[in-house]
Every structure is written in C-alpha cells, then in structure tokens.
Image: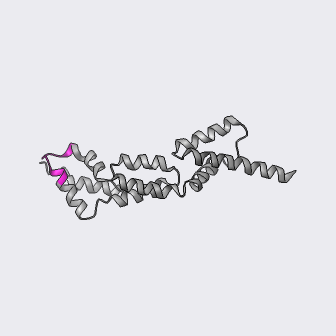
Amino acid sequence: MAFDQPSLKGRALRLLSGREHSRSELERKLARFEEEPGSLALALDDLQAKGFISEQRVVESVLNRRAGKLGAQRIQQELQAKGLDPHVVMQAVAELRSTELVRAHAVWVKKFGTPAQDVTEAARQMRFLAARGFSGDVIRRVVKAADRADDDSASLDA
C-alpha cells in the first residue's frame, strides 16, 4: 500500500463531506480502490457504526434538494438508484404524494405562469411536468386549473 494514497475510509469520508451517500453508492465509487478483498466492507461497516453513513439522512438530503422541483415518481427513481432499502423509499414517496399537487403547481408557475393558449402549448406544459416525474392526474389538474383560472378572470372582466 502506498502511503501517499488516501485509505478507503479517507476516500469515503471525503465523498461524505460533499453530500450524503448511501452505502451502495460508496461501494460502487470505491470498489476500484480496494486492494484486499473485504477491506471496503470493513471500512464501510466502521463508518456506518459511527453514524457517518445513514440511509435516513440520504433520503432527507434528496427530498430537501429535489422535492421542490420534481415529482414523486422521479424522486423514487433517484432513491432507488442510490440502492436504498425499498421500504424506506416507499415511505418517503408516500409522504411526497400528499404534497404533489402543490409542488407541481409551483413548478408550473415558475416555468410558465400563464395558461396555455392552445392545445399544443397545453401538451408542452404537460410534457414538461411529466418529465419532472409528476403523476398524470396531478399534471391534468394543474394545467386544467390554470385554464379555468384564465376563463374565470375573462368572465369577470366581461
């Protein structure tokens, strides 16, 4: 082992100092540096026992960074890609679904702000929200609510 190279634990801590990582993310990123079979698992076991690796913190971090911009489906994909426990992922997604309509509306307002003037524009707005992982029902409700709001203001002006 060369002394000028950081240890597996040092490399893991460096990664964790930037953002929360799941154990499987760390395993994937650090596998190429493992010199002795099993040494990576031991280093990660030690870090997990000391509280440096936490699935709950990874979930909270993703939710804090991404929930304002993305729907539950997209966040579920990101959490699954991190190799987290499926039960933890499903619990986080269930909590997100309760606020999905409000979050989708906020994303729509920031991007578009005005109702679609025709079917083509409405489809574009719907595709935008779908690409961000919002459910079809929520997307329809957001875009239709914007159209109704526009119709209501037009009828109030007349």
**Residue 138: image x %, image y %?**
59, 49
**Residue 124: image x %, image y %?**
62, 38
Q: Is residue 1 left or right of residue 32?
A: left
Looking at the picture, tell me which residue is in the foreground, 144 or 112: 144
Q: Is residue 124 left or right of residue 86?
A: right
Residue 10 in magenta stretch? no
Is there any visible trace of residue 7 in the rendered image? no
Q: Which residue is pictured at 27% across the width and 64% down the height?
A: 51
Residue 35 in magenta stretch? yes
Report the span colored magenta.
Answer: 32-41
Marks counted in the figure total: 0
Is there any visible trace of residue 22 in the rendered image? yes
Looking at the picture, tell me which residue is in the foreground, 93 or 47: 93
Q: Is residue 52 left or right of residue 36?
A: right
Residue pushed farthest bottom? 50
**Residue 82: image x %, image y %?**
35, 49
Colour mapping used in the image: one colour
Q: Which residue is pictured at 20% across the width and 45% down the height?
A: 33
**Residue 50: image x %, image y %?**
24, 65
Q: Which residue is pictured at 39% across the width and 57% down the height?
A: 59
Q: Is residue 68 left or right of residue 32?
A: right
Residue pushed farthest top? 120
Q: Which residue is pictured at 64% across the width and 51% down the height?
A: 109
Q: Is residue 72 above or below residue 60?
A: above
